[in-house]
Amino acid sequence: MGDCGSVTECASGSGEPPAILAEFLLDFPIDFYNISLVGGFNIPVSIVHSGGARDCANGPFLRCKTDGGQAASGVKLNAPLTNLAKATVSRATEVVTRRNVPVPVVNSPVTPSRPVDCNSATCLSDLNHHCPHELQVRRNGHVVACKSACLAFNQPEYCCTGAYNNPKTFSPSNYSRMFKDSCPAAYSYAYEDSFKHFYLELIT
């Protein structure tokens, strides 16, 4: 969701930052989605499940049925995160590395004893209204986008590069925390692991 100049399809696969990203990895029977603020923010975004029916009464397995009535792959607690979709190891690795939200159609790992719904991913706060001056992109006197710290300063400590190219040496900045406070369902830096306490396993 960014500018591609005079064309409708971006050659790079994404618009020119700063731009919020709605990312999808569709790989039946388990799909993934997330909202990313790593490249900055320009407009509010929401990914909302449409159709289907809940079927979350099967012990530790949490499922959301597709419209055709066939249960999509679900979530099992206490299984290693690396067990994700054995048939798609490379894609699963990408998902885990980028901290995408695991979903079967649309799903999220929660405690089974709690009410379960097919969750939406949202970033509905308008970060442009409280974007720090040094991150602002202005047009005609108005803030139209908010850069990430990496985009604004291009420094290793903000971009997860160089000595910081490791989740053990990289820590979120105050800027990424500001993004996270405004949009807790989105990820705000490359090594963020918002779901490190959840586990999932493909159900076949």
Image (cartoon, helix red, strand yellow):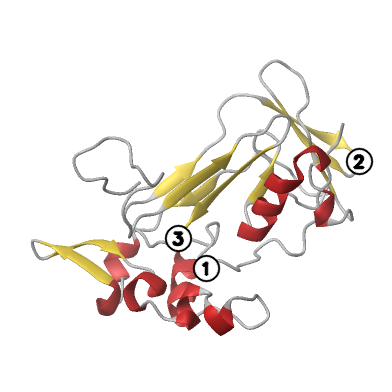
Q: Position of residue 175 (x, y in %)?
A: 43, 77
Which residue reaches farthest top?
68
Q: Is residue 156 left or right of residue 153?
A: right
Question: In the rendered view of the protein, which quadrant contains the C terminus?
Answer: top right
- Amino acid carrying mark 1 in the image: Tyr
Q: Which mark is residue 59?
A: 2
- Amino acid carrying mark 3 in the image: Leu
Q: Residues within 10 Å of mark 2 (few under 14, many from 20)?
A: few
Q: Position of residue 69 (x, y in %)?
A: 74, 17
Which residue reaches farthest left?
140
Residue under the point 71% across and 47% down = 90
- Amino acid carrying mark 2 in the image: Gly
Q: Residues within 10 Å of mark 1 (few under 14, many from 20)?
A: many
For the residue pair 185 and 135, the one nearer the viewer reads as 135
Secondary structure beneath dot 1 equals loop
Secondary structure beneath dot 2 equals loop
CA gap between label 1 and label 3 equals: 7 Å
Secondary structure beneath dot 3 equals loop
Residue under the point 69% across and 61% down = 195
Q: Which mark is residue 189?
A: 1
Q: Nearer the viewer, mark 2 or mark 1?
A: 1
CA gap between label 2 and label 1 equals: 34 Å
Q: In the rendered image, which quarter is residue 8 located in?
A: top left
In this rendering, the count of numbered labels is 3
Earlier residue among tags 2 and 3 = 3
Q: Which residue is mark 3?
A: 37
